[in-house]
Image: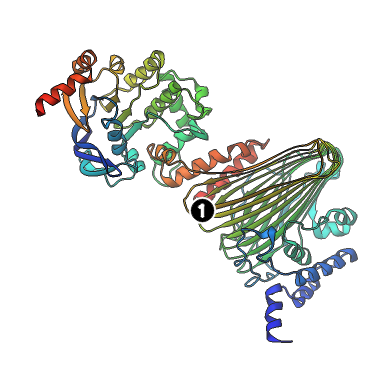
């Protein structure tokens, strides 16, 4: 093997080598054969797929020079929950806390919910106890938005995650919390949350991603699968608050069945470079997916958001609103596509990306797109980028409000219509508190 | 007792000099009116004092209680006790009046100190009652879609909450019908106190029917050319600005 081939191999896998993969498998409890097979296949894909290239349309405007696997490795198996930020205290019906991909602490469900068949458990347990359901939904959708290599890495090295299942007709009133932390310099983590909301069930899942207080650089490749069966109401809140030196990927897949409704809101605050890919499939009439995102980008952070709304059935609705507030030299990219299949008549699809530029040096790119094959549809998309009007800035200043506080105030004003879409005041308040914390950093 | 002292002030926008060697001293408790035709530099004067970045003070000084404010940013000047009531207040969509004023109050507190929310609302509502403003007003976005009268009332409410030492009121009467004018004037009169100095800028005499000034100054071509008491405003109303112009021409020959 020549030296140049060696270099090439290294750059494709970093420290996530075949040896590391074998060690990873050896450290896991026995896995169902189907899952072991899939992990092996995933590792092969990861190792063979190239890093994103300059000619790749799905990476347009992204900074690829800073995308690297180097410097990251699988964390040691022992990690304590001692050095973690206190999670934001809202009442929950159950809670799972993972540190470096392993369950650290948990609060179990109330007995009545457990008796009615609600499950909040680790994926490791669910693989054995609810294998069929996990197999049906876990990473069932291919990564179509550019990060196939990283999705394969996630699948290969996925250690543990959350499995949430709500049976038919059951409503879980309080949110279920999933917390994923990374600890230790260079730690690579692969958080996963799988939610199956049964027919006419109702559930809210709040997920938080954070780093240990030492704020090391981490590498996070997270994914979630949200499945809303007929008539289900599923609300998902994702709060990305990794350390500011972290490289983050978060890959979402949402499936919405007949008359079901999924509302997702992703709050992006942390990481030096964060890529978020979100796919919503509207598979049966009456399905509705509301996709919301709020980003506060500062310093030299880059937030890269790629979305796909696929209308596969008639009378389906999707509504996407992504808002980015940019400060300093920060950069955001939004690329969204609405696809309407030929028989998805009466589709109602909306896609909007709005950017608030709070400095002269920030940069927002927006690439909205439509691909419509049906003839009786209503599809709207648009992108706006607005700068702070100097007169507005002077007005705020003339009331004694300094630039920093003015930015915060204007950001909240800009975010208000998204936050108001949340039905829960408590969630609304918790998100506000977290956003405020970013302005104190 | 506070004092706002403007001495030999020159203000330019870009290369163009607008205010030319203007001097004026306002003490707490006094209401000064500056009158003059359009384009004489009245608004420029108020914005320059408030610290608008587009207005360059080329020479002279502005001192608040003996201390020059010219090296301070607009927000520092505001916290030091200046308030500018805008002729055209900015709209801030999504930010409620309550949250806006809360941020302004918070800005006046020491770092790490948190505003007591219930005391704040109590104070806000008492000021609104005093100014006869409906409480529903506070949940609306700042000036967003407001009528001219509502915008000016919003300015007065902010002034009441922030309790400045000196208020610069830029064409507060512009765009108001007589009812709105009366409401705004009532608000200012309610706030008149030995602790507040006011500089009122106006084109028309009619505002001075409602807010009676202690001193009236006529501004012409960037300078104060005539000073008197409230009767000067009536004289101007009767004779028009041409009278001042002719007097000036006669004086300078």
View extreme (front): residue: B253
The answer to whether B219 is drawn above or below residue A373 in the figure is above
Relative image position of residue B124 (x, y in whole percent)? 44, 27
Within the image, what quadrant is residue A193 found in? bottom right
Which chain does the residue under circle 1 lie in?
A: A
Outermost residue on the bottom side: it is A2
Instruction: Identify residue for label 1.
Output: A362
Residue B228 in sight here: no
Q: Tell me which residue sits at (72%, 48%) in the image.
A: A337
For the residue pair A145 and A185, the one nearer the viewer reads as A145
Q: Position of residue A345 (x, y in %)?
A: 83, 37
- How far across and down, in percent of the image, does residue A307 sit? 71, 50
| Image label count | 1
Q: Would residue A366 be found to the left or right of residue B247 on screen?
A: right
Dot 1 alpha-carbon crowd within 10 angstroms: few under 14, some 14 to 19, many 20 or more: many
In depth, the one of A340 and A84 nearer the eye is A340
In this rendering, position of residue A45 left or right of residue B42: right
């Amino acid at each position: 093997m020549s030296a140049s081939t060696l270099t090439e191999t290294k750059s494709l896998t970093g420290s996530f080598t075949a040896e590391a993969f074998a060690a990873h498998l050896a450290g896991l409890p026995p896995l169902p054969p189907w899952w072991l097979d899939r992990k092996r296949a995933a590792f092969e894909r990861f190792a063979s797929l190239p890093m994103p290239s300059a000619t790749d349309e799905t990476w347009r405007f992204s900074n690829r020079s800073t995308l690297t696997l180097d410097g990251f490795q699988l964390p040691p198996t022992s990690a304590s929950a001692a050095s973690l930020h206190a999670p934001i205290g809202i009442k929950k019906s159950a809670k799972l806390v993972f540190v470096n991909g392993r369950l650290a602490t948990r609060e179990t469900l109330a007995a009545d919910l457990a008796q009615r068949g609600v499950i909040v458990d680790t994926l490791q347990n669910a693989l054995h106890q609810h294998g069929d359901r996990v197999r049906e939904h876990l990473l069932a959708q291919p990564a179509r938005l550019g990060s196939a290599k990283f999705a394969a890495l996630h699948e290969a090295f996925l250690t543990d995650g959350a499995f949430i299942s709500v049976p038919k007709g059951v409503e879980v009133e309080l949110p279920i919390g999933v917390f994923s932390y990374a600890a230790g310099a260079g730690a690579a983590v692969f958080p996963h949350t799988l939610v199956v909301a049964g027919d006419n069930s109702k559930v809210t899942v709040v997920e938080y991603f954070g780093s240990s207080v030492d704020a090391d650089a981490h590498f996070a490749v997270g994914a979630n699968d949200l499945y809303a069966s007929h008539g289900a109401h599923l609300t998902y809140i994702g709060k990305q608050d990794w350390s500011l030196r972290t490289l983050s990927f978060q890959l979402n897949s949402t499936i919405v069945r007949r008359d079901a409704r999924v509302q997702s809101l992703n709050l992006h605050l942390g990481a030096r470079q964060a890529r978020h890919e979100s796919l919503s499939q509207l598979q049966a009439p009456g399905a509705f997916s509301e996709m919301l995102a709020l980003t506060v980008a500062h310093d030299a952070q880059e937030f890269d958001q790629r979305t796909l709304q696929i209308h596969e059935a008639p009378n389906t609705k999707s509504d996407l609103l992504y808002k980015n507030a940019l400060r300093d030299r920060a950069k955001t990219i939004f690329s969204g596509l609405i696809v309407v299949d030929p028989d998805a008549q009466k589709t109602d699809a909306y896609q909007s990306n709005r950017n608030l530029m709070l400095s002269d040096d920030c940069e927002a790119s927006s690439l909205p797109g439509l691909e419509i094959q049906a003839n009786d549809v209503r599809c709207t998309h648009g992108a706006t980028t607005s700068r702070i009007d100097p007169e507005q800035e002077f007005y705020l200043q003339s009331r004694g409000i300094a630039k920093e506080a003015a930015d915060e105030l204007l950001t909240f004003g800009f975010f208000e219509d998204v936050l108001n879409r949340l039905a829960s005041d408590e969630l609304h308040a918790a998100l506000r508190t977290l956003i405020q914390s970013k302005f104190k950093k | 007792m506070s004092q706002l002292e403007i001495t030999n002030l020159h203000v330019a926008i870009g290369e163009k000099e607008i205010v030319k060697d203007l001097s004026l001293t306002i003490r707490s408790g006094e209401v000064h009116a500056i009158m003059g035709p359009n384009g004489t530099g009245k608004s420029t004067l108020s914005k320059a004092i408030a610290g608008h970045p587009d207005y360059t003070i080329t020479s002279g000084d502005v001192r608040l209680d003996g201390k020059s404010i010219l090296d301070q940013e607009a927000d520092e000047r505001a916290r030091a006790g200046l308030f500018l009531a805008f002729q055209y207040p900015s709209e801030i969509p999504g930010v409620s009046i309550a949250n806006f004023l809360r941020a302004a109050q918070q800005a006046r507190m020491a770092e790490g100190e948190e505003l007591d929310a219930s005391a704040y609302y109590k104070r806000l509502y008492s000021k609104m009652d005093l100014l006869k403003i409906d409480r529903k007003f506070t949940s609306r976005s700042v000036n967003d879609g407001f009528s001219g009268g509502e915008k000016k009332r919003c300015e007065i409410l902010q002034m009441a909450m922030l309790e400045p030492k000196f208020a610069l009121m830029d064409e507060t009467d512009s765009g108001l019908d007589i009812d709105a004018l009366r409401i705004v004037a009532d608000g200012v009169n309610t706030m008149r106190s030995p602790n507040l100095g006011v500089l009122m800028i106006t084109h028309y005499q009619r505002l001075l029917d409602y807010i009676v000034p202690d001193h009236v100054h006529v501004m012409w071509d960037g300078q104060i050319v005539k000073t008197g008491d409230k009767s000067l405003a009536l004289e101007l109303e009767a004779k028009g600005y041409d009278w001042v112009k002719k007097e000036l021409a006669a004086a300078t020959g």
